[in-house]
Amino acid sequence: MYNYHMSHNPEGKPQSSHHERTFEKVEFSVITGAIDFLNREFTDILTQKSLVISISDPVLQQTESARLDVRLQQSYENQASLITSYSSYFNAIGFTLVPETDSISIRLDNAKLFVEYVNYRAAQRAMLPSTEQDAKEIQDIKNLIDRAILHVESTMMESSDDATLELLAHGQQIVDAYKKISKNDSWTRLDQLGTYAHYASLGCVREFVRAEKLGLLKPIDMNGYLLRWHTDATAKVLKERWDAVLETLHMIYSNESARAELYETALKNARIALNIALHDLERISSGDALYKPEYAQPLLPVMQSIKVQLNEF
């Protein structure tokens, strides 16, 4: 056991020594592994339950349904047991185990506490000699940081999520602490957190995330995400996707910081992608492509309308 859980007094209140938190050892990867296994079990049971109705033999259908109900009940009991046994460990480092109808979610509630935990781990790691358990220890803290990043990504668009805002405010501390723990291990997910923290410090992280997801901040090439939209979408879906681009451009322009950091690149890439898509559709419409000309007929008016709107920026 090599990870750390904040020490508690008998009343359950955090204790500290010399005004600093101390943490007892807990191997979180074992707990999260059990939670992930339970969540997969829930998914398997519920998938099978949805297929029971297709069994033509009524006796067999009833038997199978009853068997799955027993498994589901056992899973709910296991869910309650895991939460009862391990909630205090996660609470101590800023997370909460939340029972869902078909899973246990691990939610970040106190980012400040989690930052303290990671910093504590870095300080402890610096004082210890290298051991054969280094890889397991690094993977364990990596797992927890990844859970925190997942929380940030799922709630970043919500201005009221305090844990996300707190973690973004201290994101660079997490990055620096992990590098100390891992001896400068390269990790793409950590780089993402650093990027989120950077744009959060500028006051435009939400605009960055929206533009990034749409592919507006990467160089437009023939494999670009935006360039594939018109090749496999109905007119309705194509309009919805490009409406999201227009909405994002408005969102960026409305934020002074985002406008300075993101607007020029996002607008340029949107225009490049749209012009290439229009050229493709015009070629298809004229019969000079692998697609049948009829494919382009409902899509061309959509893209032409989008171009008019994009020219207003």
Image (cartoon, rainbow, N blue to C red):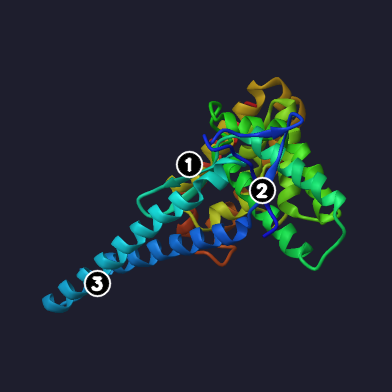
| Residue drawn at point x = 66 percent, y = 48 percent | 24
| Residue drawn at point x = 54 percent, y = 38 percent | 10
- Is 158 drawn above or below residue 125 in the view shown? above
- Residue 24: numbered disc: 2
Helix, strand or loop at disc 1?
A: helix
Image location of residue 140, percent across then percent down: 68, 57
Chain-order first, disc 3 or disc 1: 3
- Is 258 drawn above or below residue 28 in the view shown? above
Image location of residue 89, percent across then percent down: 56, 47
Helix, strand or loop at disc 3?
A: helix
Instruction: Specify whether residue 297 is in view.
Output: no
Badge 1 amino acid: Glu
According to the picture, the residue beneath numbered tag 3 turns out to be 67
| Residue drawn at point x = 65 percent, y = 30 percent | 166
Viewer-closest of 251 and 200 = 200
Chain-order first, disc 1 or disc 2: 2
According to the picture, the residue beneath numbered tag 1 turns out to be 240
